Image (spheres, rainbow, N blue to C red):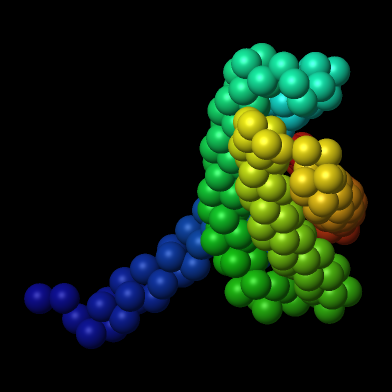
Amino acid sequence: MIGKKLIKKLLMFTVIALLLSGCVNGQSTEEKIYQLLENVVKIEKDFKDQQQPLLELEQKEKDIYDQILELGLKEKDQINSLADEAINLSAERKNLLDKEKESIDKSKTEFEGFKNLISEIKDESLKEEASALYSIMEERYEIHKQLYDKYVEAIKLDEELYNMLKDEDVSLDILEPQIEKINSIYSEVYSLNDQFNELTSKYNDGKIKFYQNAGLNISVEK
């Protein structure tokens, strides 16, 4: 029969072994943050993958619009064909835009875990850096939401214009207000896109600085 003293010693050895195991295999808070933030980068890969195809569709649609302008309003058969093609391209743009949004939404969900980890950081200056980084990214997500909403609205106005161009009785007087609305909303889209890119750059710079100040000697994806 095992004595009480021996049982106590065995329990003590078990506790020490668990503690040592935690020190060897466990991650620091800063390492957990690194892992989470780089997971966010991987999740946003789908977002990045839509960028070039979206730009190409925008250019194709612009080329078609320019062709329509060159034809004039009397060449109805050609205009109708081109307008239908442009409407299909608009639908493709919307599809890519939705894929972008889905990726960003998943990224936002993953990023929320960063907030809890910030409170575990012991170094106050490092904690302030992390909090600032969190605020930048939250603003970036908000700007993307606004960008998505405006872009969807712009695509809808584009489709309305192409359908108007197919109307037999359409005139420049009817088209001009619609074109003005389209130009106005795309101006907002471009402005929001610039803000989004600036925040992305600011976040990436801040993330690298945080890793460096946390003493994490690791490679970083942007």
Residue at 61% in and 74% down: 116
Count of numbered badges drawn on the protein: 0
Residue 149 in the image, given as x and y percentages of width and height: 66, 57
Q: Which quadrant of the figure has residue 179?
A: top right
Quarter of the image where the C terminus is located: top right
Q: Nearer the viewer, residue 6 or 151?
A: 151
Residue 103 in the image, given as x and y percentages of width and height: 57, 46
Q: Is residue 205 visible?
A: no
Residue 55 in the image, given as x and y percentages of width and height: 75, 28
Query: Is 111 on the left or on the right of 62, as rendered?
Result: left
| The furthest residue to the front | 169
Quarter of the image where the N terminus is located: bottom left
Q: Is residue 87 visible?
A: yes
Query: Is 146 on the left or on the right of 156, as rendered?
Result: right
Residue 91 in the image, given as x and y percentages of width and height: 56, 35
Residue at 54% in and 48% down: 102
Residue at 78% in and 38% down: 171
